[in-house]
Amino acid sequence: MTRTLRIPAVVLGLALALAGCGGGDTPASTPTAGGTGLEKTTIKVGALPVPDPAALYIAQAKGFFQAEGLTVEPVTITGGAAALPQIESGALDISQTNYVSTILAAGQGKKIKLVADMYQAAPNTFAIMVAKDSPIQSVADLKGKTVLVNNLRNIATLAVTSQLKAAGLAETDVKFAEKPFPEMGNAINSGQGDAIWITEPFITANKNTLGFRTIADTMTGATADLPIAGWMASEEWAAENPRTLAAFQRAIAKAQQLASSDRKEVEAILPTYTKIDAKTAAAITLGAFPATLDPARLQKVADLMLEYKYISSPVDVKSMIVPTSG
Amino acid sequence: MIAARLLRGAAGVAGFLVAAELFIRFGLGEGLVFPAPSAILLGAWELLADGDFLEGALATLTNWVLGLLAATAVAVPAGVLLGALPPAERAIRPVLEFLRPIPSVAIIPLAILLIPVDELMKVSVIVYASIWPILINTLYGMRDVDPMAKDTLRAFGFGPLAVLVRVSLPSAAPFVATGVRIAAGIALVLAVSAELVAGGAAGIGVYVNVAGSGNRMDLMMAATFWAGVLGVAANLALLAGERRLFHWHRARTGEVES
């Protein structure tokens, strides 16, 4: 039996050996850094290449992190849910997340903390669209139709379901199917669905190149001004690095303020970390960039998730938030 | 003769590009959007001046080479050892046959959870995927050694180690090289897939994700094009190396010029 295990053991041994070599450059080597008192001076921060985390790159460009004695290494992630294991394993210190994913994870007992707000829905930032010649005119017409969403059982389906309810329908009256945002337009025109739930820059792109129509803004009524995305860290990391976290929070809050007070700041930074060019950046609809993480506003997300049975018991979001300290 | 072959190959590629261009411009149904080859090639050209892409390509290339080297360093000795000890090979075979067909992309989420250093995670996944073809080919190579040559050496009083070094290893080397060449293609697939699934600071797969999120399908395809070019280049280079090193092998097995 020991023989049959040789190959996997060799693989494992190699992985461990490599881990041993790589261990040297993980930033365990930064105790109290010169004067700033930060537990960790270099942090890896995960973010999506979309408008939401603009403040991270604004703070980086304006030297807000630097002023706090903090070096931030941005890492492109593939989604809030995908970043969660990277936060848990320590591959990332802080990461972008969407609130539905985070509250779902908290409902499953994951020790995740929300450390700052990032992006909040504004009118026409998350729309249900149909092809130009579609017979569908309103949300009520979606009965029995297929709606394409980027992820099942997440913010997309939650937002659409809340609009269905307002139109007198239930979640079960439509069929949801997963499709990445960039492929949704073609998918509709080749008959793979009837409507799409989509955000920028794809709302503008589908309208301009394919003539798609918006039949509903999904961030109205119960979902008006819905908090969308924030910054997360593991409970352990937040407890072990309070001063680093506070420095990050201060720098991000400053950048959020800038982003929310001057749209030009966001337009200028978008082409530097996304493939959204300056012309598109000027044309798309942007959400809001709140400077503080307000538990009362965030609770709305958890309450909606409970109402539509995304979580089985109430989640008090206050217990998930690490408030800004000084 | 080589010139004629190159000419035919170039004609094939040109024909494909023209056909694809015509189909996408005129044959694609109304309301479907896909960048034509001319747009993709133009994008690919522009990527050569894009610092983010070049940094990404370098990161992908580094992981790819490290992964392939590590896999070779593990799989060749293991294959030689198992090939030299048939009972051990028979015992381990079922495990190999079980592990080998597991789609390596499926272990990426597990690797993300277990290995906290991003580059190491990616290299480990590449190693896992590319070990199998090298190992299996080494095993076959060891089995294919001419028994007469081994017996002859033994009859002259050479020990098992000498037989291994003088007969078995040289005889198995061409098989090992083929294994490495097949593994190189698989390693590239995994290098890019790991980036597509896990993201990262830089990489061809990371660039594809960023381009997709910005609704730039032309750049997605252009980056993919370069990944393909890297794969073709690696295959050609390894093939040329095999031909140079093992021309005697081709002569022996009577393989014809392809």
Image (spheres, coloured by chain):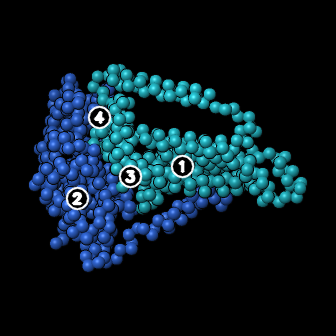
Chain colours: A blue, B cyan
Give, as a three-letter code, the residue at label 2.
Answer: Ala
* Residue position for label 3: B55
Instruction: Evaluate whether label 2 is on the same chain as label 4.
Output: yes
CA–CA distance between discs 1 and 2?
39 Å
The percent position of residue A100, horizontal first and vertical second, equals 25, 51
Give, as a three-letter code, the residue at label 1.
Answer: Ala
| Residue at point 76%, 39% (across, down) | B252
* Residue position for label 1: B129
Give, as a three-letter code, the residue at label 3.
Answer: Glu
Q: In front of the other: label 2 or label 4?
A: 2
Q: Which of A272 and B80 is in front in this view?
A: A272
The percent position of residue B237, horizontal first and vertical second, equals 57, 43
Under circle 2, the secondary element is helix
**Residue B39 visible in the current orientation:** yes
Q: In front of the other: label 4 or label 3?
A: 3
In terms of image quadrants, where is residue B211? Answer: top left
| Category of crowding for the residue at label 1, using alpha-carbon neighbours closer than 10 angstroms: few (below 14), some (14–19), many (at least 20) | many
CA–CA distance between discs 1 and 3?
24 Å
* Residue position for label 2: A61
Left or right, B35 with reference to A53: right
Q: Mark 3 lies on which chain?
A: B
Instruction: Evaluate whether label 4 is on the same chain as label 1.
Output: no
